[in-house]
Image: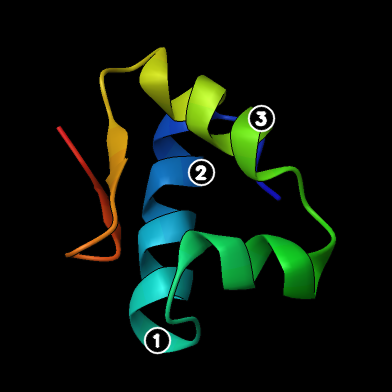
């Protein structure tokens, strides 16, 4: 997983768009902490939109 928040944003939205129906599915499949991802991206003003299945500003 990218450490830079801006790169993480791009990475996450690509993964969600192309491979996973939800952030929860991504986290479970990849063994990642869903809340940690959300906290990192919140620092740059993004939050997860479940309906869109992407991080938005």
Crowd tier of the residue under label 3, counting other residues whose Cα lies within 10 Å: few below 14, some 14–19, many 20 or above: few
Q: Which mark is residue 18?
A: 1
Asked if residue 18 lies left or right of residue 53, the reply is right
The residue that appears at 40% across and 44% down in the rendered structure is: 9
- How far apart, in angstroms, are the residues tagged by discs 1 and 3? 21 Å
User: x, y (%) of residue 40?
Assistant: 53, 23
Q: Residue 11: horizontal and vertical position, in percent? A: 48, 58
Q: How far apart are marks 3 and 2 (CA)?
A: 12 Å
Secondary structure of the residue carrying numbered label 1: helix
- Against 46, is 1 above or below? below
**In the depicted structure, whether residue 8 falls above or below residue 54:** above
Return the x and y of residue 8 as percentages of the image width and height.
51, 43
Q: In the rendered view, does 29 fall on the left or right side of 47?
A: right
Disc ID at residue 36: 3
Earlier along the polypeptide chain: callout 1 or callout 3? 1
Pointer 3 with pointer 2, Cβ within 8 A: no
| Front: mark 3 or 2 | 3
**Is 31 left, or right, of 46 in this rendering?**
right
Seen from this angle, which residue lies furthest bottom? 19
Q: Provide the residue designation for mark 2.
A: 8
Judge the density around disc 1: few (<14), some (14-19), many (≥20) Cα neighbours within 10 Å.
Answer: few
């Amino acid at each position: 997983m990218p450490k830079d928040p801006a790169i993480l944003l791009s990475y996450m939205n690509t993964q969600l768009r192309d491979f996973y129906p939800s952030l929860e599915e991504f986290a479970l499949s990849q063994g990642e902490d869903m809340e940690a991802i959300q906290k990192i991206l919140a620092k740059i003003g993004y939050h997860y939109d479940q309906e869109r299945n992407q991080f938005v500003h």
